[in-house]
Amino acid sequence: MEISTQKKIAVINDISGYGRCSLTVAIPVLSAMGIQCCPVPTAILSNHTEFPVYFFDDYTDKMRSYIAKWKELGLEFDSISSGFLGSAEQIEIVLEFVEQFRTERTLVLVDPVMGDHGKLYATYTKEMCDEMKQLVGYADVVTPNVTEACFLTDTPYRDHGWSRKELLNMAMMLRLMGAKSVVITGVREGNYYMNVVLERGKSEAEFIRMKSAGNQRPGTGDVFSSVLAGAVLNGKTLCAATRLAASFVKDCIKKSDELDIPHSNGVCFEMLLGKLMKK
């Protein structure tokens, strides 16, 4: 059995060589927070899909063989985190991974990257939605945005005007599906964005508001979920981790605007990684 005092997290996501998202965000963010990030690639892309052209290599057929070697080596992880998954089979593979590697001390974080602005991504099918509902049931922490929370709970979507009671009810529904703790991200409230945190065993949610710093950019969700995962692994409460993640994303957006970083290039988080050290 491998023994280490450094925390290790298996992150299941794609690798996009350009554009600051998925594993190219998770690896440096988690490393800055003192955590060993162990990637399980779901696909290889030259750049993310908001660019007009891109190279794409689906890794589904290789994932089980890749994972089998980790099992053969007897590797253990303090946390397992999943991000964008491109097919129902990939969601099944993540379910298998959790069943194979989860121990009593393993924290499972699921970011159900399904859609935004009231619409599912073009790749998402009903079968994938049903599989994702199963995966949510395995999560210690699930972090849907409002669109994803609506699709997971069969709640009609709207882009504003959510009451706190409605948001709490949605979080409760996600917990009834099996998720132990819930963070509903990016709820628009005037000039603020709000994150709804319903922690394990609690009946009341915390509503964490942060003033908008600018327009949303690709990869901000990956930055948020990576910081949140690292903070929780480093001993912060889920509410404190959410505040740190939201604050860091806000700072990254502001810095990107200051440097006139093109929207498609995501957020310039690299220059701010020092803020995450020992936090």
Image: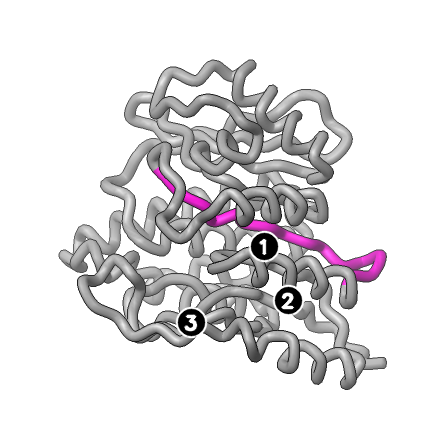
- The residue at the far left in this view is 260
Residue 188 marker: none
- The picture quadrant where one finds residue 165 is top right
Where 117 falls versus 30 (above or below)? above
Tag 1's secondary structure?
helix
Residue topped by disc 3: 15
Residue topped by disc 2: 9
**Which callout, 1 or 2, points at the residue further toward the start of the chain?**
2
Membership of 230 in magenta stretch = no
Asked if the residue under mark 3 is in contact with the one under mark 1, i.e. CB atoms within 8 Å, the reply is no
* Rendering colour mode: one colour
Q: Position of residue 152 (x, y in %)?
A: 55, 35
Asked if the residue under mark 2 is in contact with the one under mark 1, i.e. CB atoms within 8 Å, the reply is yes
**Which callout, 1 or 3, points at the residue further toward the start of the chain?**
3
Where 250 falls versus 188 (above or below)? below
The residue that appears at 69% across and 72% down in the rendered structure is 6
Of badges 3 and 2, the one in the foreground is 3
Q: Position of residue 91 (x, y in %)?
A: 59, 57
Magenta region, residue range: 102-116
Q: Position of residue 73 (x, y in %)?
A: 77, 85
**Which callout, 3 or 2, points at the residue further toward the start of the chain?**
2
Kind of residue at disc 2: Ile
Residue topped by disc 1: 229
Q: Is residue 208 left or right of residue 251?
A: right
Kind of residue at disc 3: Ile
Q: Quadrant of the C terminus?
A: bottom right
Where 66 falls versus 241 (above or below)? below
Q: Is residue 34 left or right of residue 53?
A: right
The residue that appears at 54% across and 49% down in the rendered structure is 128
Q: Position of residue 273 (x, y in %)?
A: 41, 63
Kind of residue at disc 1: Ala
